[in-house]
Amino acid sequence: MLNIALFGPPGAGKGTQSKYLIEKYNLTYIATGDILRQEIAEGTPLGMEAKDIIDKGGLASDEIIVQIIENRILMNPDANGILFDGFPRTVVQAYILEGLLLKMNTSLMCMLSLEVPREELIRRMLERGKTSGRSDDREDVIDFRLQEYENKTIPVAQFYNEKKKFYPINGVGKLDDVYKRLTKVIEKNLENVWLNIVLFGPPGAGKGTQAKLLAEKYNLIYISTGELLRNEIALDTEMGKIAKIYMDKGDIVPDEIAIRLIEAKIKMNPNTKGFIFKGYPSTIVQAYILDGLLRRLGTSVTGMLEITSTTLQSMKRLSARAKTEKARNYDLDPEIIIHRLEVYEKKAPKVAEYFQKQNKFYSVSGEGEENNVFEKLCKSVENIKKKLR
Ligand code: AMP
């Protein structure tokens, strides 16, 4: 998700720029000031509680803000992202935001701060006051609003600066120029977001073939647990020796081994655009492990792409592969093939459910020509990619 906080003193132009940004990036807009004004207009208990302090130009309490913000964030699990305007305005709110986004398995991509000198802010707010009808766009109140900003809101900048997510942007000049400065930073950030796709499906569904094609098309690093393990076996390493015992039987290798190989492979490619994982996660435990690993590296699974295959089709493909030089030890014995399909059938539903719950699950039929399946997969990847923005 593309979550952005627009920051800056009152009058910096956050509301104006927000309109353009939500349209360009298809974002849900959450402006705490607007919500509070609406609550006041509707005479809700929260609105009534906040009214006096807002009229004076002070900040509403964090307790009020947390109550109006949670529902709005959780209401939109399918959004491309959220644009926050006027929130977080205190360090406490910054912590609250971190927690809420974490709950949605996402985080704030950046805080964009519109920097405008004090005289210009005052001029703009007085100008707006002529038409806005806002009780706080008056000379006596404006001064206190700016004071509140200095005292309570500026520390939020430090909070995100420490996380390397804070971007000061010159907010003076033509609307369009300021807009271009903002989008430039957003585009730069988007370039650095990894596209991580998990290719899922039973043995013989065509995951390996398709994953390599997808990796090439989308410029991703292909990570096949099976391949990494076969490498270890060929090199006769300690991990390889252990892995071989499990693989030859058609069983899943111990979790410590696979994840160490995956982590090493990820770390070898810090400058990639993302990864395509094949054959991992294949159990619910592995789903948690991969999530944890990626999060530790500041990224996450963008989407899981399942290629479905009937048992008959899988059997046909695997026994065909057994007759080629690509044959694996575990392709040669029908009993082992059946065992692998059984293991998949048993473990897969929980893995799929894990990603379904996060709205990250996509499924494509593996029936038919390689090209046709690839085309369908690409369509799903385009949808997954939207989750990045
Ligand atoms: P704004 O529309 O963002 O300029 O907000 C107008 C007024 O609403 C502010 O001066 C505050 O009194 C109140 N307000 C808006 N957002 C917040 C927030 N995140 N925390 C506390 N008070 C807020």
Image: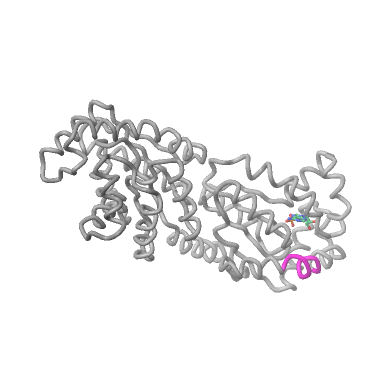
227 vs 23, left or right, is: left
Q: Is residue 173 left or right of residue 286?
A: right
Q: Quadrant of ligand 1?
A: bottom right
Examine the image and state in which quarter residue 341 appears.
Answer: top left
Say above or below: 372 vs 134. Answer: above
User: Residue 363: horizontal and vertical position, in percent?
Assistant: 37, 35
- Determine if the magenta segment contains residue 153: yes
Q: Main secondary structure of the magenta part?
A: helix
Q: Nearer the viewer, residue 241 or 27?
A: 241
Looking at the image, residue 369 lies above or below residue 325 = above
Q: Which residues are magenta?
A: 147-154
Query: For residue 194: magenta?
Result: no
Q: Residue at x 80, y 64 (%)?
A: 145
Q: Percent position (x, y) of residue 162?
A: 61, 70
**Image location (x, y in percent) of residue 57:** 83, 60
Out of 290 and 131, give the one closest to the viewer. 290
